[in-house]
Image (cartoon, coloured by chain):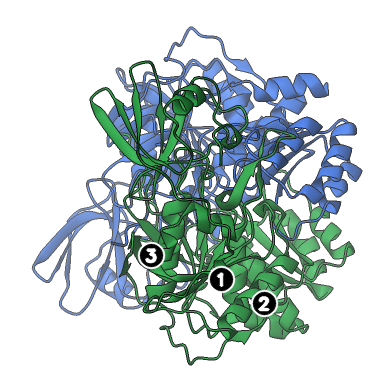
Chain colours: A green, B blue
């Protein structure tokens, strides 16, 4: 790859070219008494400035360094020629586990759109593999692109497709499955797969990145390496989300697929467990169990695949201006289920009660969660909760509203009967409900004193 | 008040009656070598067990103690006769500041509903004052009940009423206003008052409690005492939410009215600042400034009252199953504004774009916030964000979705022109937007290692 096709330009391109440095070369950059050594990465971002280069350190992490007149840059080792053979044809290394990487799109596999200047999904699973060659050290990797969408566009039908792909990988024999996915709806997909893939024999690890891989601060490589190690080494067989545990690059946290959500728009530790604790911490290839998983790894266990979801389920977040007509809209448009994101312990304005009753009378399952996110629903404490229970609203206990939505979609694809659906919905199936979860499973307060 | 009308029954009633102890008496309870001294509180909860009594300690905090055969209970001091004169007629104590307490309902002023067994709003401001007599130590209190509703039923018209009542208190001369309010929608009301009450001369403090005052673990007294002190002592003039800073009873945090939300269904420290830090910490009568407030106290400053809100503004939380018809429902029912709670940096599924465009073409203001809650919208990074900006969607920056909803209601009551409304909406008015807020303003991760 030549330098100019890789996104560098201006002063940086000049400086690199004059030293005959190419993308993929191991280089040394000396600046202000400090030396950094790493592999020169392509910089494909449109409008990138003329002053920074991006190198991948031995840790697998990318950094950006501003070049100025006094900066010395020289080549330590020429890069290898770009691989062209597909990963599937890589020689199998004996003694290494087998890992499947299914790519769905998102930042972890994205590049810049020349039309709008914004970032778009593009890289293939193969490209991921090329970008993070260290993956080969840990596993024989089978990489597949199963779709290429920004995660905000993922729909229930996509969960079905992903679940089927995971089942197929497991059928073909794998020690663990990694799914590269955009972070926007990563929590929805992980909940969906948690219900669709029952009796898993091996771990399924959803992984994303908060900064695209062409940015100096990208978390893509570290997250992918961690995911491969979690998928192949953890003695567990459930669906996880693996992301940074804190904003630095010290370690990753594996959250239960039904219990985590994106709580920050940009931080690398955006994902947090809610009403639960992370199950594993991962540092490089070191996988540490923090909590007992629901199931242990057992390659003999036979997967139960239930990949279907009822799309006609709505999420309604209450607020002081909400009107009952919104509930009636969903009744009129053929909704089968409604998850209300109420306030506090599970309340909705009294004025919604007639519409909610109408929905339930029409056969719709209506469930109550809390927009607080943390904590447990308790509809027996206040009058408005008690009255909603009387009408037939199902409490979501300590389930996240997003998980409740997905679960109701899954339940209604698996039973059409309202009462049976309510019963199935209330039963813990994938760690999404815990009758004993503690108040201590809460984020610590922001500092200030 | 006799014991049996106060909710005690069975063994406890027997034990207390035999020692001729009445509610309001200072009593000593000795059990297992431990002695607790406090004022016997009424226990009005239906179905309360027969074994616990509740006493208020000198710290102002209530505890419940289980009586058993070996427990000694005796009276130290008889209680004063119940006051009957209204607070307004209390003698004015010279040297003390004047504080107004406006009661709207909620747990901080609630009692049990005999019909359903659940908790209902009931206590008057006067009752609050009787329940926490220490308030008299800190201020000459003017107590008023302006409404009595559970906060899930609060509507925009109620904010107008509350804002007018605050303005009237300020006009009559007060050193600070305290509003007792249910916690379910406390964050919505505090945002509403932040926009409705501009150029405040004194602090306005919203306060609630997570456990009703007849429960042993009630936070009502400590929060009220703190609120009176914050309202009368803080050298600040904005709208605050004051609640427990952590789950124990060590201190309280004052959050900016536009920047806090209820993040836990039951913990006493449920309220957290989002993308901002708490401004004051309060311990008893000690009020400590943590951050510089927007305005300093200045009783000469003339309040600008803009108490109106456009009710036809909707909140739409996106999810993988959402359909464009929901946006069209709001267009068809005459909505003037829509706040989308999108994913990540401010995205919505591409399939919503035609409906969003239709809404904007119809003159509706559509704004984009993030369901991540923490962090800042940045719609320039990904294609779907860029396309929404092109259509005319207004980014909410680092505003909470709930605050954005209230602000849009307020903006649309103050200007009917779409472009002028967009401009006003994007301008920081009450600390709700900060172009420089930091990623560090994030909850710390849950433990696990």
Q: Earlier in the sequence, mark 1 or mark 2?
A: 1
Cα distance in 3D space between marks 1 and 2? 23 Å
Asked if the residue at tag 1 contacts the one at tag 3, i.e. Cβ–Cβ closer than 8 Å, the answer is no
Is residue B115 visible to us here?
Answer: no
Q: Does label 3 lie on the same chain as label 2?
A: yes
Q: Earlier in the sequence, mark 2 or mark 3?
A: 3
Cα distance in 3D space between marks 2 and 3? 28 Å
Judge the density around disc 1: few (<14), some (14-19), many (≥20) Cα neighbours within 10 Å: few
Percent position of residue B365, x then y:
78, 32
Task: Tell me the residue at 48%/57% (across/down).
Answer: A374
Q: Nearer the viewer, residue A218 or A60?
A: A60
Q: Nearer the viewer, mark 3 or mark 1?
A: 1
Percent position of residue B262, x then y:
50, 48
Q: Dot 2 lies on which element?
A: helix
Q: Does label 2 lie on the same chain as label 1?
A: yes
Asked if the residue at tag 2 contacts the one at tag 1, i.e. Cβ–Cβ closer than 8 Å, the answer is no
B99 in relation to A58, above or below: above
Q: Dot 3 lies on which element?
A: helix
Q: Chain of mark 3?
A: A
Percent position of residue A95, x then y:
36, 79
Q: Which residue is mark 2?
A: A164
Q: Quadrant of the N terminus of chain A?
A: top right
Is residue A67 visible to us here?
Answer: yes
Judge the density around disc 2: few (<14), some (14-19), many (≥20) Cα neighbours within 10 Å: some
Q: Chain of mark 2?
A: A
Q: Which residue is mark 3?
A: A137
Task: Tell me the residue at 40%/83% (across/down).
Answer: A296
Q: Earlier in the sequence, mark 3 or mark 1?
A: 1
Q: Which residue is mark 1?
A: A89
């Amino acid at each position: 790859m030549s330098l100019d096709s890789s996104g560098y330009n201006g002063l940086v391109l000049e400086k690199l070219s004059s030293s005959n440095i190419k993308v993929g070369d191991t280089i040394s950059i000396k600046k202000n008494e400090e030396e950094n050594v790493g592999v020169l990465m392509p910089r494909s971002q449109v409008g990138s400035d003329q002053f920074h280069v991006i190198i991948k350190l031995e840790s697998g992490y990318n950094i950006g360094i501003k070049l100025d007149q006094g900066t010395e840059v020289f080549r330590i080792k020429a890069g290898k020629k770009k691989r062209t053979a597909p990963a599937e044809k890589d020689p199998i290394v004996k003694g290494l586990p087998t890992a499947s990487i299914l790519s769905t799109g998102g930042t972890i596999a994205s590049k810049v759109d020349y039309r709008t200047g914004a970032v778009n999904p593009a890289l293939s699973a193969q490209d991921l593999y090329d970008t993070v060659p260290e993956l080969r050290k840990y596993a024989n990797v089978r990489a597949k692109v199963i779709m290429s969408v920004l995660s905000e566009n993922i729909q229930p039908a996509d969960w079905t497709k992903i679940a089927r792909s995971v089942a197929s990988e497991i059928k073909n024999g794998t020690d663990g499955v990694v799914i590269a996915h955009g972070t926007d709806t990563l929590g929805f997909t992980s909940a969906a797969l948690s219900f669709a893939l029952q009796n898993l024999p091996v771990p399924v690890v959803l992984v994303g990145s908060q900064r695209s891989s062409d940015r100096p601060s990208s978390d893509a490589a570290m997250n992918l390496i961690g995911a491969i190690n979690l998928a192949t080494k953890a003695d567990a067989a459930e669906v996880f989300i693996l992301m940074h545990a804190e904003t630095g690059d010290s370690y990753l946290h594996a959250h239960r697929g039904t219990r985590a959500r994106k709580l920050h728009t940009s931080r690398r530790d955006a994902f947090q467990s809610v009403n639960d604790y992370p199950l594993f911490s991962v540092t490089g290839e070191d996988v540490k169990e923090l909590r007992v998983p629901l199931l242990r790894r057992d390659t003999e266990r036979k997967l139960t695949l239930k990949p279907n979801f009822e799309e006609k389920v709505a999420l309604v977040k209450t607020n002081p201006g909400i009107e009952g007509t919104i509930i009636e809209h969903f009744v009129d448009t053929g909704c089968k289920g409604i998850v209300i994101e109420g306030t506090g312990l599970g309340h909705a304005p009294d004025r919604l009660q007639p519409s909610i009753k109408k929905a339930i009378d029409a056969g719709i399952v209506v469930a109550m969660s809390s927009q607080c996110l943390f904590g447990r629903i308790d509809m027996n404490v206040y009058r408005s909760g008690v009255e909603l229970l009387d009408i037939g609203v199902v409490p979501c206990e300590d389930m996240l509203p997003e998980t409740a939505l997905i679960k109701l979609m899954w339940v209604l694809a698996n039973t059409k009967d309202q009462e049976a659906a309510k019963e199935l919905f209330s039963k813990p199936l994938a760690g999404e409900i815990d009758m004993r979860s503690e108040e201590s499973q809460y984020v610590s307060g922001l500092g200030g004193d």
